Image (cartoon, rainbow, N blue to C red):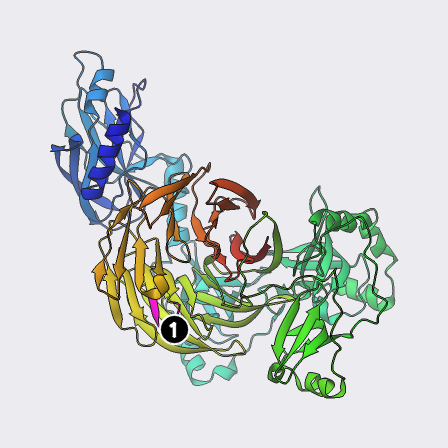
Amino acid sequence: MCGNLEASCNRFLFLAFTFAAFACTGGVSHAEDLVKSTEGMVQYKLSKVRIENSVLGEVMAIDYKRTREGTGNVSLSIRSDNGPVRVMGLGPRIESSGTIRLRDMLARIRSTLADGQPDGLEFCITATVSTLPGNPKFLVSNIVRHGKLGSKWKPRDLNDREKEFLEQERLRTNPPESVPDGYERSTSDTTLVPGMPVMYGSMGEWLPAVVARPSSRTFVHLYVDGRETLLVVKRQDWLAVSQKVAKQASRDPDSFSFAESVLPGTIFLLKDEQVPATEVDNLVPGTPLLWARGIKWQSVHWMAEEGDQFRVLDRSNNAPKMETDKATQFAVTKETLQKLKAGDTDSFAANIKGFESLRIASAATSGTSSATGGMNLGVAPARSETPVPSSEEPAAEVRTWSDASGKFKIVAALVARDDSQVTLQRGDGRTVKVPIDRLSDDDREWLEREPEPEEPDDNPFAIEPISSTTAVDDYKGQFNRVAALKDINWGAQSLGFSPDANQVVVGSRSGTFWFSEITTAGLQTVSLKDAEIGEFNSIAFTPDGQTLLLGGARGEVMVYAVDSSGRLTFESRYKLHDRKVSQIVVSPDGKKALSAGDDKQALCWDVATGRRIALLDQFSGRVKACQFAQGGSIILATDGKNVIGLDLANDRSLNPVAVARSHAAGQSAAFSPDGTQLAVGDTYAIKVFDLTTGRQSKLLQSTEIQWSMCFAPNGRHLFSGGNGKVNLWDTQTGGLVHSETVGSSFYVQSLAISADGRRLFCPTDHNTATVFEVK
């Protein structure tokens, strides 16, 4: 009976509506706590409560309409005289207007009530404020009834504690209502130069500050007396500039200057004659350092220099540990500097006494050897108890190579060269090919003097370099950290690899994106750009790597040309969707792109012109994934409920495939690279479909919602992001290969896999994204 009912339900959902079932909690004799709404909260109007007949039986329907925009996370609340009635499963999604339809389980509810008692229900829309203690529900609509009830749902007033908290929240999230006399609010076009005095809004007041550096058209860095770091403030509305200063800045910007020192590349202020640690060349083990971490300086002790990184001992808690970070993230105090200059460093050894073995223990447990103390920058040889004999032949000269700009360096040995490029071998055994015309003048002169390297003998201990043409066929579940990009404003919203996997792109919620190159020294940012398209939600390269596409929150796509040095040149901006562009994929020939939008549309368009080619729009929710199939002649897209496709060559719609009971059943979906498979979230599980047959092939069982997904290039393995974890699945067996903890207390909402399947890019905390080698 249940199986038949479920089958009928799925068929009906495909044809008509999304329903949630509801049932009484039972055993509850009091009404759910309901609080009167406050000013600024969203408001709705409910009407026309009725029973409709459908193939599922009786359906309860309620019309609703938003009457005022405002704050609050809304949901439907229901009660009977017997207590609250909970919506089972995923509750109905409430938008600006529509009809809420609930599969009617009134018969079951009535059967739970004592004979003769009223059997009516009351409905309302409630809102919560996530930061308010106790998470009370605010009444943000009228209350409507169906049937008879013996009591009424009565909302209460806010208590004093709740009033105080909401007032503090209002002040925190809203700029001051008025500006001081003689001042005007800043806009994105207001001239801001380092050193000019301004006022910034904080908790309803205007406080003095000095512009340190305008970081973008959206944000500005301010110096505030008494802070250890620069303050990041929105330019629009939250900043006030005196009319006199504004005129002076426009007329004579050089009349202002910023007198404070900032640790380069950070927001940390250098005071009391502190100096960057990179300017000190006589550090000894145990030297006290200040680490620019978070929003406060952290005291650590220097252990060693490894490339452009420092390994330091962190004794700030009960579990001392070794950490590594770029040398540019550390500073030295005046007192320490004086001791170093005087050679008075005997006391420094006591800072690390007893912890010298900590480094050895940390390295031994890492499972790999690394040039940066735990951060694996390449493929490492397997550990062995038997030492590998060294070659008696002299090793090739290891030297530091630099590119023509001088920004990027690599420590490596020359192992091969031809007329156009050199092959360099790094300390981890990996090789990299570099065009000679991209090398520095000194390197090119060295090449002219150096004889051709001999062909190496067949070395049984050589490490196989990563190939950009051969995809990984199988995975054992090994994740080795390669490099990380930190201090991503507002966190990583989207991630992407270049076709050769040597560059990565990170799009943030702040409207900034980073174009970075993966080097032995970590991620080296080549370009850092802002754009007025809101947050960056999607990233894609053309197969030749010469064009970069970035989709934004306002439905626009930015197009950049990428040259051989990684320099970006803006080319076009296309307005393609009405809402967020959640994914972009490019056809194999690089001429067409397919974008998925939160406007319930998938659009195929010409990369060179932005001209629309085809549209898929018969979706009930946001489009979660899209893909080209059969060499780019077929386009596919899904909202998590149905897969819709179009044969571009014959202008023919494909038969839709139903994959879930609702577009809201899961958070993410992904097509395999060839478009023959689909993985789609269904609450905690992942369903895998063979789209050639339209049937489900596997069910991957998880214990939490999977917030992101991507197939490996082999089409067999699937990566998915959970709560601080990345899961690796085998879609042929349906088994979990490995679950890697990459962080804590955050959802992994974006994943990117390189074209060869050997590198994975994912967020590892709220403002960091990390590249992993996966095996």
Can residue 739 be seen here?
A: yes
Mark 1 residue crowding within 10 angstroms, few (<14) / some (14–19) / many (20+):
many
Q: Is residue 152 above or below residue 454?
A: above
Q: Is residue 638 left or right of residue 484?
A: left
162 displayed left or right of 488: left
Q: Residue at x 84, y 49 (%)?
A: 353
For label 1, the SS is strand
Residue 114 in percent (x, y) is at 22, 12
Question: Which residue is disc 1 drawn over?
Answer: 559
Q: Would residue 141 be seen by someone viewing this image from the given angle?
A: no
Judge left or right: residue 282 versus residue 325.
right
In the rendering, at what x and y percent does residue 220 appear?
A: 47, 67
Magenta region, residue range: 588-593
The amino acid type of the residue labelled 1 equals Val
What is the x, y in percent for residue 365? 72, 46
Q: Residue at x 43, y 59 (%)?
A: 509
Q: Is residue 166 left or right of residue 323?
A: left
Q: Position of residue 223 (x, y in %)?
A: 54, 66
Which is more toward the observer, 341 or 571? 571
Among the 4 quarters of the image, the one containing residue 21 = top left
Q: Is residue 106 above or below residue 42?
A: above
Q: Is residue 46 above or below residue 386?
A: above
Q: Quadrant of the N terminus?
A: top left
The answer to whether residue 309 is magenta is no
